[in-house]
């Protein structure tokens, strides 16, 4: 039986859940355990066990809510964190269960109530509290890494665990891709090519990893947007999106970041906010939900979320200026979970690739099954992440493609590492770079430095 | 048997990570896809996830020693409580036996393990030019083993037949732990058709460990027609006329206005919001045949009152038209938090009257009922919409179901067209079957499983003990002969 | 044809040399069950008689006491042409049923040899099929409901008059092909199908087996609406008969294509001619009782049909047995052959032939042979897997072995 939610002195309680951020009873009970989610769940696919499925996890949450299972039962902890939060289940759920927020709330519960192993905590603190809480710090670290690489200090850097944390363990393979110059918000701006109609404006959400390691991808995306008739800049004072914090159940930390981002982007009115990292995009689109109980921010958060567009989604909403330079290669597309499942965007990236002359897109099997990256999952659940990565690599390698295209930095790194491990030298690239190439690339359009509008 | 010994022995068979016995782990094996309230949950004593038939045989032997029932479980999407362990015991979960072992292009067969997912079998055989024809709406999740056990159907079964028409042979583990093959690759295998008996036996006769299934060649061309009608009557009429005209479409599905109201805003499939009902008709075959038949069907629809007939040949267009149908169940969430459905079948000519009765029941019970179903087969899916948090609503729904079922049986219909009896509908069995009919079924059960070890408390009405069956028949015989002592 | 009661009276009702001494002609299901229960109680053996066209199929009976005729259960019980379903008494003649269906442009797509006089009950009991199985399957795919009288004195029904039904176990399929050993079929319900609008048959000649089967393979691999495909061994070579059914234009186009693609002699038959040819074709597979004639059916995986056919021919010639007739169904993996044992005709001779065939094929059924040769041989061939489950079934449904004792697989 459902236990009524008590609202006693702001302490919420639902069976074994208590305190702020508890899974919502109505959301929980929307699941009718039909099982349609099973086959799309990566952890269920690997284990075949019911507790590792979305339906099973929801049933466990329900058992905690009904006082049939202890919140601190090891199974509950294990399952809430074994989940990749890839949201594939949400996309196929006939009953429209909001699985993501439920698993995140369950993690928040565990964070609040459970002592975590010291090592894991330290790692998370460095990673999430220190590194990602301020984009300046991340830029600094990335600079140090580049330096370390140049001076042969990679081994040292690896030993610090920092590389692992960033999913950049295989630095050797990654180095050529690490951008020389991070994008500092406020510093760069691209002016629109004249396209029929009025001049438009767009704002780039920089993101931590995208703005540093993959800064050049962000620049490529900006150029493509500009080629399609919009001025675009990178508003100052923006922060990490907080997705990793939400995934880890660190809701308060996430809210702090969200509020700062809302403030930073409010100045630019209703202009679309363009995101190149699917994971960030999904989180930004959920600010409305994250801050729904914050009287001062709830409405503003929703307005913010409504402005957010994935890069491919943005382009899909208008007539594309045809990219003209042929790219005579064969590629396959790996769908980031947070694009295809969380944001339900799957047609647009393919349409864009099909618009590139000479390019052949060959589908791989299970293109929408998680690659195992899932935020910091590949760090805390290495074994399962590797299994998923290998599966992805195998499917990609079955195709004749020489390049794997994706739209999220986590996937990019995970897929690359998996391909190398499986002996493939195929490149892994962000779709923005591919499009940019067909529009003429970096030489075609330079950023105006230090001239951001906001 | 001591619990610890049982656990140890199970682990000895399937390895440590193939056994679950902690209460927390067992929680997630107490349900299947059935609706809360219609099927009670029940917890197993242990769950084993074997990877070979030999392991299953060993588990069965162990269970026999321990005096525990055994319940096979596929994906747990069943809608009649089939995989719920009514009397506890050991659940054998087949999810780790999910390999397609062989695809024989020339003989058009596939040899698969029971945990293979229905849709994935079709996807795997597609490059060879085939598909697996039974296509339950749950095909993205349900397993071949489950399909065999339930004799599942789907929209395309109108033309291609249900699961039993596509199973050529089975490897099964019997309740005494032996592994045997039934049927096979060649015609003329002697003896009783044990394969035929196994299909649809709801996990009560044997555990399927391999299935040899027929593959169907992908059609050269496919056409989907959408025909809106002013009301259900005229759509049913069109259905009858198509069938009577000697046309066998690949699929013939109907959706009523309430369904359209739920589906169209969600998926924009292009169903007219003001239509009383739409028919979705798929035709496949050679390009010429498809074209010719399409014209005929369109004419019949128009004569029966269709306001227009739209057609789609391109994959994307067809998929869009189908999407509304396939996602219909889920879209009901837009109308009410819960739904409950039955899957009775009526003779096709009884469709209009039956739908009228369903409408009356909807009114009498003050319960919205949406209809989305396999019209070509007469297989209804009346979806009763409710909110289970409202006191007494579940009971009302169950009452209304009973009315619907009773009516369908009265007009010569069947209790279930594809979801099976399980625990959910066992109470209704006596509506259609006499004690003698059930005794014959019990005779089949006893031949495979005399001690009632596999999936107990299913299909037969509550309290119908297998031991009683013999007695009942003896009694009947004695009566006939005027003999008193036997 | 004289009624079976008359035949019993005249001592004419003999099955494989065993004569029936009593007859019963029940008028309804319950009476049928009563006859069975009484026989069971008295330890008598009952042989159900339908059209009497396949009474010799199976092992020779251990005993025959009562000849139980279904002739008075011969009516069409219910036929809804618009629903495409039919319910019919077990004693109804298949030919009569087809004629009624034909009036509405419908049919049971089934063409077993000599089936016109066969009864519905007999067809179910023997589970027989003909060349149409290639496209239409067997009765297994058509039977949707059944009513059966048991030796317990009860009548049970299963299935119904709807085309899709999973209410309880699939009993109809259990009874199908069980040669009456689980009960006597009283009535049966079928899904019927529209008659094809047009049909044609192309018969092409080939010099050798490989060429004929290569052509068959090609047809099997395509998507044409082929209803049946049979390869007939003529001592001079092979003939491949392709039966096409469907819409007029399609049938015509496919027939043309096959004709123009054939290398050797080729004949095209349309409509009446085509139908006539096929009924003559299946009639060559009579359960003929001519002296020394043995009719066998062997089954393998369909793709191995050619190999089976050629090894049968070789092996038999090695055993000095002539093969006056051999037909193969490349899509079904079956070969039906008439074997002339000549002077070697005897029980041992038959056993030797069966042994030889069993080493070549997955299944071997001796459809017909002189009764004295059949004694002691299980004409159904290899004991099926799961035989003890079958024994249990027999024990459950007919513990006294009242119906057709000893006749079915494993002498059940
Ligand atoms: C949204 C939804 C839509 C559905 N649509 C349809 C539909 O269109 N048509 C239809 O027919 N059904 C439908 N179903 C019902 C269900 O999906 C089918 O019955 C399916 O075949 C069950 O497969 P499963 O693997 O989930 O089996 P389970 O639910 O795990 O088991 C079902 C039964 O099969 C037995 N079983 C499972 N595996 C084996 C085995 N290897 N050997 C022996 N017994 C075994 C179990 O003991 C149980 O009795 C639907 C269900 C849902 C939730
Ligand atoms: C000339 C000829 C050639 C044939 N050749 C072949 C062939 O080559 N291959 C082949 O496979 N088949 C062959 N058959 C068999 C034939 O096609 C049918 O299968 C046969 O018709 C059965 O029907 P019936 O009414 O004549 O049955 P019967 O001959 O009367 O009975 C056949 C068997 O079924 C039992 N039976 C009859 N009625 C019932 C009932 N109501 N319930 C339970 N048991 C019952 C009988 O006891 C008997 O064992 C041939 C038939 C004929 C006449």
Image: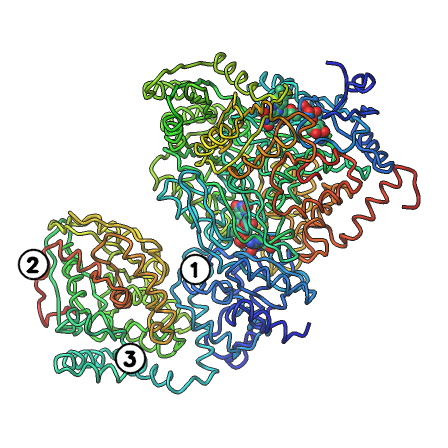
Would you name the residue on which mark 2 appears?
A444
Would you name the residue on which mark 3 appears?
A133
Q: Residue furthest left?
A: A443
Q: Which residue is drawn at 19% across and 70% down?
A: A173
Check the residue under mark 3 and report the chain it is in. Answer: A
Q: Residue furthest top?
A: C273
Q: Up-down: is C174 above or below A253?
A: above
Position in image of residue C353 (x %, y %)? 57, 32
Looking at the rendered structure, the secondary structure element under dot 3 is loop
Report whether residue C237 is seen. yes
Mark 2 → mark 1, Cα distance in angstroms: 42 Å
Q: Which residue is drawn at 51% across and 67% down?
A: A51
The dot on residue A89 is 1
Quadrant including the C terminus of chain A: bottom left
Mark 3 → mark 2, Cα distance in angstroms: 35 Å
Mark 3 → mark 1, Cα distance in angstroms: 29 Å
Tally of numbered tags: 3
* Residue A253 left/right relative to B49: left
Q: Is mark 2 within 8 Å of ligand 1?
A: no
Report whether residue C187 is seen. no
Q: Are marks 2 and 1 on the same chain?
A: yes
């Amino acid at each position: 039986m459902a236990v009524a939610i008590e609202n006693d002195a702001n302490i919420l309680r639902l069976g074994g859940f208590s305190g702020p951020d508890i899974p919502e009873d109505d959301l929980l009970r929307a699941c009718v355990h039909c099982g349609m989610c099973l086959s799309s769940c990566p952890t269920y696919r690997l284990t075949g066990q019911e507790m590792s499925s979305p339906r099973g996890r929801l049933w466990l949450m329900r058992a905690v809510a009904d006082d049939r299972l202890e919140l601190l039962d090891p199974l509950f902890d294990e399952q809430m964190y074994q989940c990749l939060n890839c949201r594939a289940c949400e996309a196929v759920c006939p009953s429209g269960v909001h699985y993501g927020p439920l698993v995140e709330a369950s993690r928040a519960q565990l964070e609040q109530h459970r002592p975590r192993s010291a090592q894991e905590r330290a790692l998370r603190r460095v990673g999430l509290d220190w590194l990602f809480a301020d984009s300046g710090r991340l830029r600094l670290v990335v600079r140090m890494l580049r330096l370390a690489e140049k001076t042969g200090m990679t081994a040292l850097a690896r030993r610090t665990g920092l590389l692992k944390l960033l999913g950049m363990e295989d630095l050797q393979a990654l180095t050529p891709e690490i951008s020389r110059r991070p994008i500092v918000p406020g510093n760069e701006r691209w002016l629109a090519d004249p396209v029929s109609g009025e001049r438009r404006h767009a704002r780039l959400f920089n993101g931590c990893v995208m703005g540093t390691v993959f800064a050049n991808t962000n620049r490529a995306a900006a150029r493509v947007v500009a080629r399609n008739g919009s001025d675009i800049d990178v508003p100052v004072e923006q922060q990490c999106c907080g997705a990793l914090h939400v995934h880890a159940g660190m809701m308060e930390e996430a809210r702090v970041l969200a509020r700062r981002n809302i403030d930073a982007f409010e100045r630019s009115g209703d202009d679309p906010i363009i995101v190149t990292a699917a994971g960030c995009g999904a989180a930004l689109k959920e600010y409305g939900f994250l801050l729904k109980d914050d009287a001062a921010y709830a409405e503003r958060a929703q307005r913010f979320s409504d402005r957010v567009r994935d890069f491919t989604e943005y382009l899909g909403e208008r007539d594309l200026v045809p990219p003209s330079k042929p790219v005579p290669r064969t590629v396959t597309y790996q769908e980031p979970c947070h694009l295809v499942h969380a944001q339900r965007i799957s047609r647009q990236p393919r349409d864009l690739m099909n618009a590139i002359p000479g390019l052949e897109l060959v589908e791989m099997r299970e293109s929408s099954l998680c690659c195992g990256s899932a935020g910091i999952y590949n760090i805390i659940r290495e074994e399962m992440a590797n299994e998923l990565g290998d599966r992805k690599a195998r499917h990609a390698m079955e195709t004749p493609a020489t390049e794997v295209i994706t739209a999220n930095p986590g996937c990019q790194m995970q897929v690359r590492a998996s391909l190398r491990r499986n002996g493939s030298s195929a490149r892994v690239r962000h779709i923005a770079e591919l499009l940019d190439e067909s529009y003429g690339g970096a030489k075609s359009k330079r950023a105006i430095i230090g001239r951001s509008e906001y | 048997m001591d619990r610890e010994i049982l656990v140890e022995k199970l682990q000895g068979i399937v390895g440590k990570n193939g056994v679950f016995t902690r209460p927390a782990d067992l929680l997630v094996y107490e349900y299947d896809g059935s609706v809360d309230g219609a099927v009670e949950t029940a917890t197993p004593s242990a769950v084993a996830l074997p990877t070979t038939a030999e392991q299953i045989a060993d588990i069965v032997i162990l269970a026999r020693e321990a005096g525990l029932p055994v319940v096979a479980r596929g994906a747990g999407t069943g809608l009649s409580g089939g995989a719920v362990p009514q009397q506890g015991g050991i659940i054998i979960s087949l999810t780790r036996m999910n390999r397609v072992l062989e695809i024989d292009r020339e003989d058009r067969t596939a040899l698969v393990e029971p945990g293979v997912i229905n849709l994935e079998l079709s996807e795997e055989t597609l490059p060879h030019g085939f598909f697996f024809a039974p296509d339950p709406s749950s095909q993205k999740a349900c397993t071949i083993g489950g399909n065999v056990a339930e004799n599942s159907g789907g929209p395309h079964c109108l033309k291609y037949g249900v699961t039993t028409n596509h199973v050529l042979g089975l490897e099964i583990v019997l309740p005494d732990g032996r592994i045997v093959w039934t049927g096979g690759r060649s015609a003329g295998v002697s003896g009783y058709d044990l394969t035929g008996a196994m299909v649809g036996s709801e996990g009560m006769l044997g555990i399927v460990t391999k299935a040899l299934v027929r593959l169907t060649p992908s059609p050269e061309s496919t056409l989907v027609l959408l025909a809106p009608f002013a009301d259900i009557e005229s759509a049913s009429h069109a259905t009858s006329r198509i069938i009577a005209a000697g046309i066998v479409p690949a699929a013939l599905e109907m959706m009523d206005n309430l369904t359209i109201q739920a589906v169209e805003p969600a998926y924009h499939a292009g169903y007219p919001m003001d239509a009383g009902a739409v028919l979705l008709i798929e035709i496949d075959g050679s390009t010429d045949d498809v074209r010719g038949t399409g014209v005929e069907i369109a004419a019949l629809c128009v004569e029966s009152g269709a306001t227009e007939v739209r057609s789609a040949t391109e994959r994307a267009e067809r998929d869009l038209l189908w999407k509304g149908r396939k996602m219909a169940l889920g879209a009901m969430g837009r109308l009410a938090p819960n739904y409950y459905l039955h899957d009775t079948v009526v003779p096709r000519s009884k469709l209009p009257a039956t739908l009228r009765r369903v409408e009356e029941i909807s009114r009498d019970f003050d319960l919205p009922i949406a209809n989305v179903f396999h019209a070509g087969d007469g297989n209804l899916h009346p979806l009763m919409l409710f909110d289970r948090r409202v006191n007494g609503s579940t009971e009302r729904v169950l009452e209304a179901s009973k009315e619907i079922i009773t009516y369908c049986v009265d007009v010569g219909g069947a209790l279930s067209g594809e979801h099976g009896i399980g625990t959910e509908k066992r109470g209704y069995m006596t509506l259609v079957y006499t004690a003698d009919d059930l005794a014959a079924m019990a005779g089949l059960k006893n031949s495979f499983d005399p001690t009632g070890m596999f999936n107990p408390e299913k299909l037969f009405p509550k309290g119908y003990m297998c031991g009683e069956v013999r007695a009942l028949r003896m009694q009947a015989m004695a009566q006939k002969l005027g003999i008193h002592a036997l | 044809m004289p009624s079976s009661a008359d035949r019993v009276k005249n001592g004419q009702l003999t099955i494989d040399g065993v004569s029936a001494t009593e007859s019963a002609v029940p008028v309804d299901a319950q009476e049928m069950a009563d006859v069975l229960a009484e026989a069971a109680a008295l330890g008598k053996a009952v042989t159900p008689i339908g059209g009497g066209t396949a009474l010799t199929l199976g092992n020779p009976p251990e005993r025959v006491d009562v000849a139980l005729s279904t002739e008075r259960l011969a009516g069409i019980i219910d036929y809804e042409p618009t629903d495409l379903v039919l319910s019919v008494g077990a004693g109804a003649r298949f030919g009569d049923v087809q004629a009624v269906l034909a009036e509405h442009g419908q049919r049971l797509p089934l063409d077993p040899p000599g089936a016109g006089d066969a009864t519905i009950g007999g067809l179910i009991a023997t589970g027989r099929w003909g060349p149409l199985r290639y496209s239409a399957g067997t009765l297994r795919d058509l039977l949707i409901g059944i009513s059966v009288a048991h030796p317990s004195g009860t009548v049970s029904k299963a299935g119904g008059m709807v085309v899709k039904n999973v209410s309880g176990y699939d009993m109809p399929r259990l009874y199908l092909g069980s040669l009456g050993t689980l009960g006597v079929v009283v009535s049966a319900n079928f899904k019927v199908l529209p008659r094809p609008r047009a049909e044609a048959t192309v018969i092409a000649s080939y010099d050798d087996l490989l060429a004929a089967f290569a052509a068959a393979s090609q047809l099997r691999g395509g998507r044409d609406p082929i209803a049946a495909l049979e390869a007939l061994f003529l001592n001079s070579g092979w003939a491949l008969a392709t039966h096409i059914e469907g819409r007029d234009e399609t049938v015509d186009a496919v027939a043309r294509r096959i004709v123009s693609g054939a290398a050797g002699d080729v004949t095209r038959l349309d409509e009446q001619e085509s139908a006539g040819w096929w009924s003559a074709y299946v009639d060559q597979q009579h359960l003929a009782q001519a002296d020394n004639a043995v009719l066998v059916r062997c089954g393998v995986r369909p793709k191995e049909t050619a190999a089976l056919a050629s090894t049968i021919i070789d092996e038999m010639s090695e055993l000095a047995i002539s093969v006056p007739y051999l037909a193969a169904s490349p899509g079904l993996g079956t070969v039906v052959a008439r074997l002339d044992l000549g002077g070697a005709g005897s029980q041992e001779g038959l056993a030797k032939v069966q042994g030889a065939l069993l080493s070549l094929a997955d299944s071997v059924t001796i459809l017909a042979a002189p009764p004295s040769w059949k004694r002691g041989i299980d004409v159904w061939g290899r004991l099926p897997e799961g035989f003890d489950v079958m024994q249990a079934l027999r024990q459950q449904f007919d513990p006294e072995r009242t119906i057709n004792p000893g006749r079915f697989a494993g002498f059940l």
